[in-house]
Image: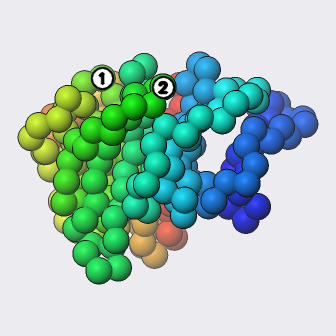
Amino acid sequence: MNEGNGTVNEMPICGGRVTTLARRQDRPVSLAVDGTNVYWVNQRAGTVNKVPIGGGRLTVLARGRQHPVSVAVDRTNVYFLDQGDSFFTRHAGTVNAVPLDGGRVVTLAYSQFTPNSVAVHGTHVYWTNGGNGTVKEARIGGGHVTTLASGQNNPSSVVVDGKRVYWVNYVANGSVNAIPFDGGRVTTLAGGLRDPSAVTLGP
């Protein structure tokens, strides 16, 4: 994915030819992949999109979004964040879901404070709010929003596994952190990092 020329690309894991899956995208950011498609958001254009792995017809799943910044996917939905007009109202962010084939967008959480990364696991969706230093969760069907961690310093790039939620604090003296699914004590897995911006999980 290249923001400068607005393309979404793929290549073999072992290296080789780069294939362009989508062109003329307006500030594409954040990728998610399932067994069939590649998903992303166009931040400036305000769209949620997908294209088949290997290339094919591009489908716009949602339009008219306000500064979408992150995307995750499960077997049913694409989950994405809208930061809203954060210049004027920093708590205008939302957490949203749209079916894999497009349709009605459902908002799972309102009034979020500059949300910047989303993940999904099982029956819940998880996200970070960089604006007020929180890590939150909500049921996929909507309902009560739970704060798992607070007092974090610009948390971002959240991922989950079967036991814990992980994120980085994106600051000069940054860290990688974890907390159990059902809440509890925050564990710092690595500290003293310089502006860590992303985290993922291996086997």
Instruction: Locate residue 203, reporting x and y percent.
Output: 53, 25
User: In screen coordinates, is 70 left or right of 112?
Assistant: right
**Tag 2, which secondary structure?**
loop
Q: Which residue reaches farthest right?
A: 17
Q: What residue is disc 2 on? A: 101
Q: What residue is disc 1 on? A: 122
Is 151 placed above or below 79 here?
Answer: below
The Cα atoms of the two marked residues, 1 and 2, are separated by 20 Å
* Residue at x 41% of width, y 55% of height: 65
Q: How is the image coloured?
A: rainbow
Of the two numbered discs 1 and 2 on the same chain, state the one appearing first in sequence.
2
**Tag 1, which secondary structure?**
loop
User: Three-letter amino acid code at disc 1?
Assistant: Gly
Q: State whether residue 157 appears in this view.
A: no
Q: Nearer the viewer, residue 188 or 145?
A: 145
| Numbered mark located on residue 176 in the image | none
* Residue at x 61% of width, y 54% of height: 28
Q: Nearer the viewer, mark 1 or mark 2?
A: 2
Q: Which residue reaches farthest left?
A: 144
User: Three-letter amino acid code at disc 2?
Assistant: Asp
Instruction: Locate residue 131, reporting x and y percent.
Output: 28, 69
* Residue at x 13% of width, y 45% of height: 145
Dots 1, 2 in contact, CB < 8 A: no
Q: Nearer the viewer, residue 201 or 10?
A: 10
